[in-house]
Image: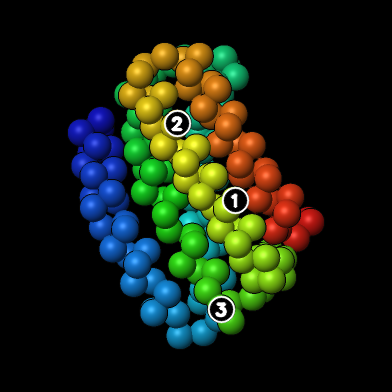
Amino acid sequence: MKKLSTLVALACMTVGPLLATSASAQFAKPEDAVKYRQSALSLIGSHFGRMAPVVKGQAPYDAAQIKANVDVLKTLSALPWAGFGPGTEGGDARPEVWSDAAGFKQKQQAFQDNIVKLSAAADSGDLDKLRAAFGDVGASCKACHDAYRKKK
């Protein structure tokens, strides 16, 4: 099972960036871009959420399992942004995504930088470092949602 997870993660890391680059050209309709970004963000939330019980001390720390989730997150973290191109307004995104594109890009970059730090923490095998980096990723998600996501 671990080998399969590793192979899936490697495949995602290899193919994911290629898909992210060409995705914006593939949206026939704006709603396709909305579905794409929502799907990518949903997967990010799922893989991030799988680590929460470990970080909170509610589940045993399995360094290999955490590393596998973080590897998938690294790939996923590059995907949703292609779905936020011009003319793709809608979904849960607030208009500020487009009217404050520089601020949105800054929040996106902070998220991706924090994912890199989370990866380094997962590689270290140090649960305390993982907890700190996990918190930073969560904070970057919240900062973007607070500024650019419609209230539910």
Identify the residue under disc 3: 86
Q: Amino acid at mark 3?
A: Pro
Q: Is residue 39 above or below residue 2?
A: below
Write down the residue under mark 1.
107
Measure how far apart labels 1 and 3 are at the Cα level: 18 Å
Q: Visible in this render: residue 8?
A: no
Give how far apart the Cα atoms at labels 2 and 1 are. Answer: 16 Å
The residue at the point 39 percent across, 79 percent down is 26
Reply above or below: 53 against 42: above
Closer-to-camera residue (101/25): 101
Could you tell me which secondary element the residue under label 2 belongs to? helix
Hey, what amino acid is under mark 2? Leu
Residue 85 point in image, percent of width and height: 53, 74
Identified by mark 1, the residue type is: Lys
Q: How far across and down, in percent of the image, does residue 18 sit?
A: 28, 63
Q: Earlier in the sequence, mark 2 or mark 1?
A: 1
Residue 38: x %, y % from top left: 56, 61
The mark nearer the N terminus, 3 or 2, is 3
Q: Residue at x 42, y 50 (%)?
A: 76
